Image (tube, rainbow, N blue to C red):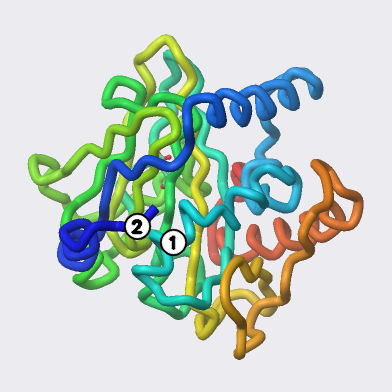
């Protein structure tokens, strides 16, 4: 799937593009079923430590980060050599108060590049009433804003980090998606999302792509999957490609990768809220 010229221009000027059709209805239903069968099998929802770097746990997520329908669009934005740094499930249960405060990911991920791109794929409908993402157009081109840690049990972010100076919410743009559609945004773009007042779960999978010249500048070690082209830099250890869901070698690697991620996300934090 290729972005049109106006979509590329909008991404460059405003920091985002949506909705981009990716999966057919039958494919979304199959993937949602695989997730929910797994959840039922372990007796409940995903555990916090299963949310991040989840391409190392679920083979079908690893397949998604290599899917040409996603990567063709990403390549148009960051070039032919592409690493996937992280994958995160964002699940808001039906009627849940879960929310995400206004934040810029640049502030917390320890990545040196301005070109990191988030692709957010909807595995259920993600409309306004289910708490779809909202973005603040153009903020990707400005400074990294001051954030405060405002720990809150319903905030899905590790520290409840929130941009401290008031943002003008009247300028926010909601990005509603149907199941199988995706949005793309620059990780410096300020974004947030509200509670899910619908009677269905809102299931999102974010995939974070970057060019290989990127460095991890907060943590001592990090890893990423080479999903297209080549990595001439070697700043990130290559993650193993799982051969099946919960492949032993990939699960062992996941434990190390998730711990390294926690060290970056919680660096200097007052609380470890165990949300990842
Ligand atoms: O799923 C959400 O509502 C927020 C996701 C998010 O913050 C992200 O993908 O960076």
Disc 2 target residue:
2
Disc 1 target residue:
72
Vertical position of residue 159 compared to residue 41: above or below: below
Which residue is most to the top?
199
Q: Of label 2 and label 1, which has the lower sequence position?
A: 2
- Measured as percent of width and height from the top left, residue 55 is found at 68, 51
Do callouts 2 and 1 mark residues in contact (Cβ within 8 Å)? yes
- Measured as percent of width and height from the top left, residue 54 is found at 67, 48
Can residue 88 be seen here?
A: yes
- Tell me which residue sits at (33%, 53%) in the image: 103
Can residue 153 be seen here?
A: no
- Tell me which residue sits at (36%, 68%) in the image: 76
Element at label 2: loop
Q: Which mark is residue 252?
A: none
- Measured as percent of width and height from the top left, residue 187 is found at 37, 62
Residue 234, located in which quarter of the rendered image?
bottom right
Element at label 1: helix
């Amino acid at each position: 799937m290729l972005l049109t010229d106006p979509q590329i221009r909008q991404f460059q000027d405003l920091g985002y593009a949506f909705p981009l059709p990716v999966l057919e209805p039958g494919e979304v239903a199959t993937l949602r079923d695989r997730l929910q069968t797994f959840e039922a099998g372990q007796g409940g929802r995903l555990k916090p430590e299963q949310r991040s770097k989840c391409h190392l746990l679920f083979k079908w997520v690893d397949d998604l980060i290599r899917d040409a329908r996603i990567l063709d669009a990403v390549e148009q934005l960051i070039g032919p050599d592409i690493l996937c740094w992280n994958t995160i499930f964002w699940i808001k249960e039906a009627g849940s108060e879960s929310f995400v405060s206004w934040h810029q990911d640049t502030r917390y991920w320890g990545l040196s590049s301005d070109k990191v791109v988030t692709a957010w794929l909807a595995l259920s409908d993600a409309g306004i009433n289910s708490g779809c993402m909202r973005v603040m157009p153009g903020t990707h081109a400005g400074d990294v804003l001051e954030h405060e840690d405002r720990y809150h049990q319903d905030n899905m972010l590790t520290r409840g980090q929130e941009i401290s100076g008031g943002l003008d919410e009247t300028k926010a743009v909601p990005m509603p998606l149907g199941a199988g559609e995706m949005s793309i945004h620059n990780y410096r773009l300020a974004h947030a999302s509200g509670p899910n007042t619908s009677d269905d779960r809102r299931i999102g999978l974010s995939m974070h792509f970057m060019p290989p010249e990127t460095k991890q500048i907060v943590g001592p070690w990090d890893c990423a999957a080479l999903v297209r082209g080549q990595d001439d830099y070697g700043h990130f250890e290559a993650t193993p490609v799982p051969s099946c869901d919960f492949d032993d070698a990939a699960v062992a690697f996941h434990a190390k990768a998730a711990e390294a991620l926690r060290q970056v996300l919680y660096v200097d934090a007052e609380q470890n809220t165990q949300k990842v």
